[in-house]
Amino acid sequence: MKAASNIVLAGLIGRGIARSRTPEMHMAEAAAQSLRGVYRIIDVDTLPVDEQNLELIVHAAEMTGFNGLNVTFPFKMDVIPLLDELSPNAAAVGSVNTIVFRNGKRIGHNTDLWGFAESFRQNMTGVSVETVLLIGAGGAGVAVAHALADCGVRHLKLFDLDTSRAQKLAGQVEANRAGITVTPVTVIDNTACADLSGIVNASPVGMAKTPGTPFPLALLRPDMWVADIVYFPLETELLAGARKLGCRVLPGSGMAVFQAVRAFELFTGRHADPQRMKAAFDAFDEIPRETADA
């Protein structure tokens, strides 16, 4: 069964995502384009244990007639073996956050890379990109690392609790992008942070379900800039500490909006309006809908 041409049926798979703003953005944009948008939250944490099977969830969505799925923490890498094809972007970074069901095939894309890069370009003009620390080398981190290279970062330091994962990503980025050196670091201390221009958190630390800060606030300096990809809460502990010190900050809202813009275009074949989708994102807390607690 396939959705009618005027219906966009999509969903988001992840853990701890009940308050995601993604459904609001997609459904508002669909309505603005005279489409009927249906976007479902598939929070694996809320499913019975025997139904927490990624392969079965993807299969069920495909058989139900979904146009596609978004994929978030912690499934961006795990979903790849379940797909038939990868876009060049997804293949290069080894991470998928958008699946399109088309002509009997499951095609994996990565819209996180462009989403972060576009947010950075539009909101962080003029900042130094000489040396940046990226925290998190998982599914989101691989996309952000490549995006930082595309934004002109010269020297990228990588920290992940899984040191082998950081080492693998370092080699991957250097192989895929010219003009950047990538160095894994095993600890975040004064030595590792002495020459930093900026910091990006691409780990889940700071999310509502995993509170805290991945970077010691005592090591922040006013001349640093700080970006976070977490957007629930929008003001993470890391961003609040950086803002208090006078650092220039970039919240996760920008990446969330721009990755959704590209995903909407992949689901529908239509261009999306970034300002309209941002307005839907910003209105989430003002006029919460049923999906807020789904």
Image (cartoon, rainbow, N blue to C red):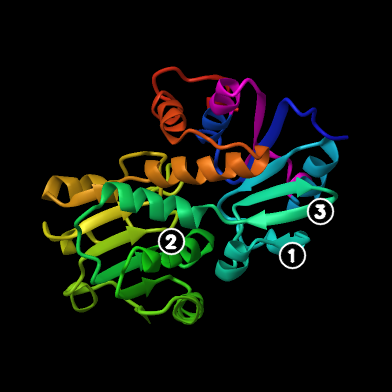
- Any mark on residue 105, and which? 3
Q: Identity of the amino acid at label 2? A: Val
Compared with 219, 99 (above or below) is: above
Q: Secondary structure at mark 1?
A: helix
Residue 186 or residue 129, whichever sits in front: 129
Q: Secondary structure at mark 2?
A: helix
Compared with 72, 182 (above or below) is: below
Q: Is residue 231 visible?
A: yes
Q: Nearer the viewer, mark 1 or mark 2?
A: 2
- Any mark on residue 81, and which? 1
Q: Which residues are magenta?
A: 27-52
Quadrant, the C terminus: top right
> Dot 2 corresponds to which residue?
144
Q: CA distance from mark 3 to mark 2?
A: 27 Å
- Any mark on residue 291, and which? none
Q: CA distance from mark 1 to mark 2?
A: 22 Å
Residue 186 or residue 271, whichever sits in front: 271
